[in-house]
Amino acid sequence: EVQLVESGGGLVQPGGSLRLSCAASGFTFSSYSMNWVRQAPGKGLEWVSYISSSSSTIYYADSVKGRFTISRDNAKNSLYLQMNSLRDEDTAVYYCAREGIVGANDYWGQGTLVTVSS
Amino acid sequence: DIQMTQSPSTLSASVGDRVTITCRASQSISSWLAWYQQKPGKAPKLLIYKASSLESGVPSRFSGSGSGTEFTLTISSLQPDDFATYYCQQYNSYQGTFGQGTKVEIK
């Protein structure tokens, strides 16, 4: 069974940093590209970042470029999102999602809540 | 950047109704469009990929159509479990833009 489990969320002050993790199981993690998607409270979904299976290709949304860094460790079946210089508007539930063979995000984690507030 | 516009934002319907949600792209995305269902407090669930292909395990009352810039999600006979928010997402470009969502409410 495919499982994605996010962790690392919490309360952080503006300007602070946080590192999210996503532990993958039930599939060959090293064969799939991955995405981070976030959802602010009461709002819609926003794509945040993409990383290819070998980490050779990485993309970021303009809203996080220069502040967030996506990475993965295929040996540990884990995906990461390092978030620096956090702002109030980064408050959201952060989901990791597997980009399936079909190109769409076919499996999602349960999400981890990041709250940026003083 | 590709913008995705969904309509309507909210839809009130009854069990058994046929429901249609529209998603428009600001430029052609071929058939690189997905539809997701999200219930409160839960992660999104993939329903349709490549505009019209049904994800495994998804009931056949869900269908998708369209190509280029205009797409639709249709629920042929709305069931109680279908009251949720639906999102389209383009994956023609790397940014993976989502529509703003359509909330399907009980009439």
Image (cartoon, coloured by chain):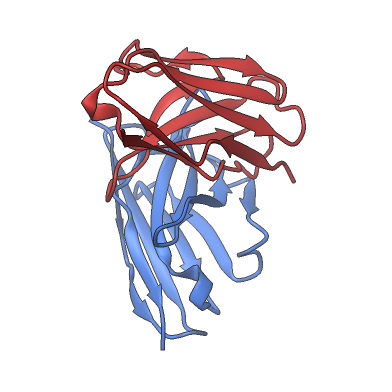
Chain colours: A blue, B red
Q: Is residue A73 left or right of residue A9?
A: right
B25 sits to left or right of B57: right
Location of the C terminus of chain B by quadrant is: top left
Residue A45 position in % (x across, y down): 48, 49
Q: Position of residue B5 (x, y in %)?
A: 63, 39
Q: Which image quadrant is residue B85 in?
A: top left
Which residue is at a point 48% across and 51% down the rendered structure image? A44
Task: Looking at this view, name the residue that lies furthest to the front.
Answer: B107
Q: Is residue A7 among what the camera can see?
A: yes
Is residue A106 among the parts visible in the rendering?
no
Residue name at image x 35 percent, y 53 percent: A22
Residue A28 % position (x, y): 36, 32
**Residue A57 placement, left or right of A36:** right
Q: Residue furthest bottom?
A: A118
Name the residue at 32% across, 46% down: A109
Q: x, y (%) of residue B73?
A: 49, 22
Pick the residue in front: A63 or B13: B13
What residue do we see at 43% from left, 38% from top? A98
In this rendering, the answer to whether A71 lies above or below B3 is below
How many numbered marks does the figure carry? 0
The answer to which of B94 and B59 lies nearer the viewer is: B59
Q: Is residue B68 above or below residue B46?
A: above
